Image (cartoon, grey):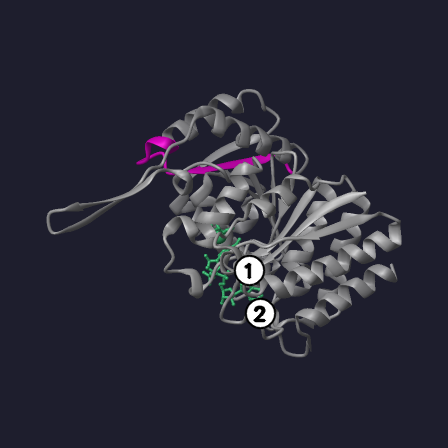
Amino acid sequence: MYKIAVLPGDGIGVEIVPEAVKVLQVIGEKFNHQFEYTEALVGGEAYDATGHPLPDDTLKICRQSDAVLLGAIGGPKWEQLPVHLRPEVGALLPLRKELGLYANLRPCFLFPGLTHASTLKEETIAGVDLIVLRELTGGLYFGEKSRQEVEGGIKATDVLSYTTFEIERIVRYAYEVARKRRNKLCSVDKANVIETSRLWRETVMELAKEYPDVETTHMYVDNCAMQLIRNPKQFDVIVTENMFGDILTDEASMLTGSIGMLPSASIGGKVGMYEPSHGSAPDIAGQNKANPLATILSAAMMLRYSFNLEKEAVIVEQAVSKAVAEGYRTPDIMEDGSKPVGTVEMGDVVAGYISNA
Ligand SMILES: NC(=O)c1ccc[n+]([C@@H]2O[C@H](COP(=O)([O-])OP(=O)(O)OC[C@H]3O[C@@H](n4cnc5c(N)ncnc54)[C@H](O)[C@@H]3O)[C@@H](O)[C@H]2O)c1
Ligand SMILES: CC(C)[C@H](C(=O)O)[C@@H](O)C(=O)O
Ligand SMILES: [Mg+2]
């Protein structure tokens, strides 16, 4: 039996998560796996119901599960709350920290049928297959924050720090991932300016000696932002710190056609967490317009990384590939001549392919 904590969250979270659960259910029935789902509140909806975006009960349910499936959290309704009660800072970051999820895997793969859904040129993106390893529990997002009154206004401070231990564990993980792929690792930093990045680069240079079979390169983050658009196929594995990884993966999602196609796995602790890379998309929430494929692909990552069910993970990915190849499109990846579908219908199509596989 596999215990899954299901945390839909806010906005489109409540629309996309049921589609991923639908897919897991079909996998369970087909392969005779018992998936037990326990739903819990998180984010703005949890704040509204309990006064805190990460209730103790939710954390307990996550800790007692084998894996967590999360939708998205946050939205305009909760933006004005004190920082510790805001869904992002009060729930998502602590959840990642509490579960020890230091490695965030964001695979950026262009399904062949989506070459024209992107705003980028076909020749630039056809065949894109890279993965970003984002450090997830350190850096600026977890540093001390403060404000003080100064002459003429207010001074705000965010502390950015990294230890060699934090850098080494994510970089080692990235090397292991590179060894299973095309043996190329690009470490992204801002070592020309930032002290934590200097430590990052020194640490990577030391570790590189242990992985002579992997080609190690270093790139400044500003250049990387440009290279991802200029020539994304030069990349295999990118490893970087928390904030750079956050920004670069939203950018990289456009290589896949839409942010609605970019899944993620957060691992490192006993319980892995799986969530799309995008947010709660308040602009399209409640309209059956959200693309559920990033969440469905995140569920496939759960099968692979938390449950070691590789064959089942591949079947989910193949069903997504088929849905795309057959022309099913939510609005974000719409093209002329395609078959328009909503969130629920896309989930039905993928689940249908799995049951008939
Ligand atoms: N992991 C998370 O829970 C997470 C991640 C990012 C942002 N957020 C939060 O989400 C809220 C909205 O943030 P934002 O607008 O900057 O980013 P967003 O990712 O929610 O949306 C950005 C744009 O992408 C579109 N989009 C996102 N997901 C989509 C999908 N599955 N299908 C189709 N279109 C999709 C949206 O409609 C919007 O136009 C904020 O409160 C933010 O803090 C949460
Ligand atoms: C909502 C926010 C805290 C989060 C992050 O920065 O990690 C999001 O942008 C993401 O990419 O998962
Ligand atoms: Mg982000």
**What amino acid type is highlighted by mark number 1?**
Ile
Instruction: State left or right for residue 65 relative to residue 157.
Output: right
Residue at the image position 10 percent from the left and 47 percent from the top: 151
Q: Earlier in the sequence, mark 2 or mark 1?
A: 1
Q: Is residue 141 above or below residue 268?
A: below
Observer-nearest residue: 78 or 257? 78
**What amino acid type is highlighted by mark number 2?**
Asp
What residue sits right under mark 1 in the picture? 259
The picture quadrant where one finds residue 133 is top right
Question: Dot 1 lies on which element?
Answer: helix
Look at the image and say whether residue 84 sits in the magenta stretch. Answer: no
Q: How many marks?
A: 2
Check the image and name the residue furthest to the left.
151
Residue 122 position within the rendered picture, expressed as x and y whole percent measured from the top left: 58, 63
Asked if the residues shown at circle 2 and circle 1 are in contact, with their CB atoms under 8 angstroms apart, the answer is: yes
Observer-nearest residue: 166 or 35? 35
What residue sits right under mark 2 in the picture? 332
